[in-house]
Amino acid sequence: MNRLKITLGSTVEPRKPALFRIISLTFMLAMQPTLLWAEWVQVTGRAPVETGLYEQARQHAREDAMQQAIMTFGTKVSSKQRMENGVLTQDQVSLSSQARVNRSVVQDEYIWKGMLHLLMNVEVDAVPVCPNSQANGYKKKVVVLGFSIQSPEQTRLGAIHNANRGLASALNRALQTQGSLVVFESSQYRLYDEVVNAPSRYLERKMLTKAANFAKQMGAQFVVSGVIRDMGVEDESAFNNSYWAKIRRFGRRANQKRRFSAELFVHDGFSGAIVWQRSFSVTANWTQDAQQTVGFGTPTFWANEYGQAVSGLVDKMAFMIDEQLKCQPFMTRISRIEGKTLHFSSGASSGIRPGDTLSLYRTSSFQDADMFKQVELANVKTALTVSQVHPGFSSGALTIDPGRLNIQEDDLLVAW
């Protein structure tokens, strides 16, 4: 959008404020807490064994192992002291974990000198620590696009050619189940046509505008997209039509394992930049007949052992997206200006209520050294008070004329 041209003597504030007043949107999002990659740690839980109470001891040893795993991964120590008349009346030290156990595997189990020892490998995830903020009270809008398929020939088994849209639909349902986001599905669109290197620096930059355009059309703050990397089988001969292959499948002696691997990308809807990405994978048996037309996301597909494994992976995707976006600020576009009244594209469905106040930010674009478009935010140090709320949009008034601040459509209202 073309900004107002400033003439000598105009009372309109220039669109290029001093550098100290400009905040890079990409930098601002990158500074938010994120969910780190999972890590495996090996620990040994211990508990005394009493006669006839082995299972109880095993449970205590497991709990001890879980606690050690979380402590190894990271804790936050806080203390609270209080003095009265020079006397220490309270001295409290507490530990708060910033991690959670994802899964665990028992490697060894034995009794030594009356103690049960449980050697375990534990996968631990870091949990984002989000302060209690205004943004936590609002539901951010997310649009889920269709996935690209890196190897379409792998969809022939089971005729799951619709995996690009089927996975997006399944992820949409899983995100809605989480209940903390407003989710739209536009699975007929996808970001990546050349998928092998997606999202390399070139493709990532190339897709900035495309991702932002999808977000603007849907009124969304974030765009979720991805690439299905692998849906191949471990042993192709196990699924041919030969007599011996059928006998092996019938006797469950064939290797019917099939892989599912997908890479997930979350784009910021205003700048188009990727704010988070992660790969997900699982392997399970494809138990349907090799010639059967199943389709991705059908009841038959979800009843398959492979489909059940994919379903669990989709739930994990949704959970991790939800965890990531909890710590992001809430942002919404200004859609219309009437005098001192600003209309914006979030309403009751996002948790907006009359009387809420949102900070006003101007947006501006610039080109970096590589001639790629970037988006900056400038805090005009003015708040809007919400007066009218509808399901999908709201409005509120400023105390001063928006023209004095050079506020225009597509500028942002933000809650931290």
Image (tube, rainbow, N blue to C red):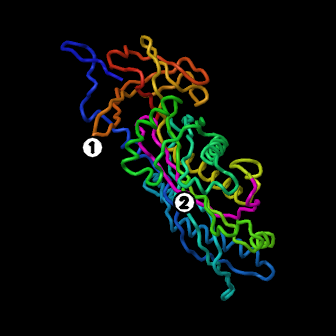
| N-term-proximal mark, 1 vs 2 | 2
**Quarter of the image where one finds residue 261:** bottom right
Which residue corresponds to the image point at 76% horizontal and 74% vertical from the top-left? 244
**Residue 208 to residue 94: above or below:** above
Q: Secondary structure at mark 1?
A: loop
Residue 390 in sight in this render:
yes
Q: Nearer the viewer, residue 73 or 291?
A: 291
The majority secondary structure of the magenta stretch comes to: strand
Q: Which residue occupies the extreme top position in the image?
A: 339
Quarter of the image containing the N terminus? top left
The spot of residue 86 in percent (x, y) is 42, 55
Q: Which residue occupies the extreme front position in the image?
A: 242
**As shown in the figure, which amino acid type bears the numbered disc 2?**
Asp
Decide: few, some or many residues near mark 1? Use Cα within 10 Å; few <14, some 14-19, many ≥20: few
* Discs 1/2, front: 1
C-alpha distance separating marks 1 and 2: 36 Å
The spot of residue 71 in percent (x, y) is 53, 66
Q: Secondary structure at mark 2?
A: strand
Decide: few, some or many residues near mark 2? Use Cα within 10 Å; few <14, some 14-19, many ≥20: many
Magenta residue span: 263-292
Which residue corresponds to the image point at 34% horizontal and 34% vertical from the top-left? 376
Which residue corresponds to the image point at 60% horizontal and 62% vertical from the top-left? 101
Q: Taking 114 as reference, is 207 left or right?
A: left
**Residue 170 to residue 262: above or below:** above
The spot of residue 341 in percent (x, y) is 46, 14
**As shown in the figure, which amino acid type bears the numbered disc 1?**
Asp
Q: Which residue matches tag 2?
A: 125
Q: Nearer the viewer, residue 39 or 219?
A: 219
Q: Which residue matches tag 1?
A: 370
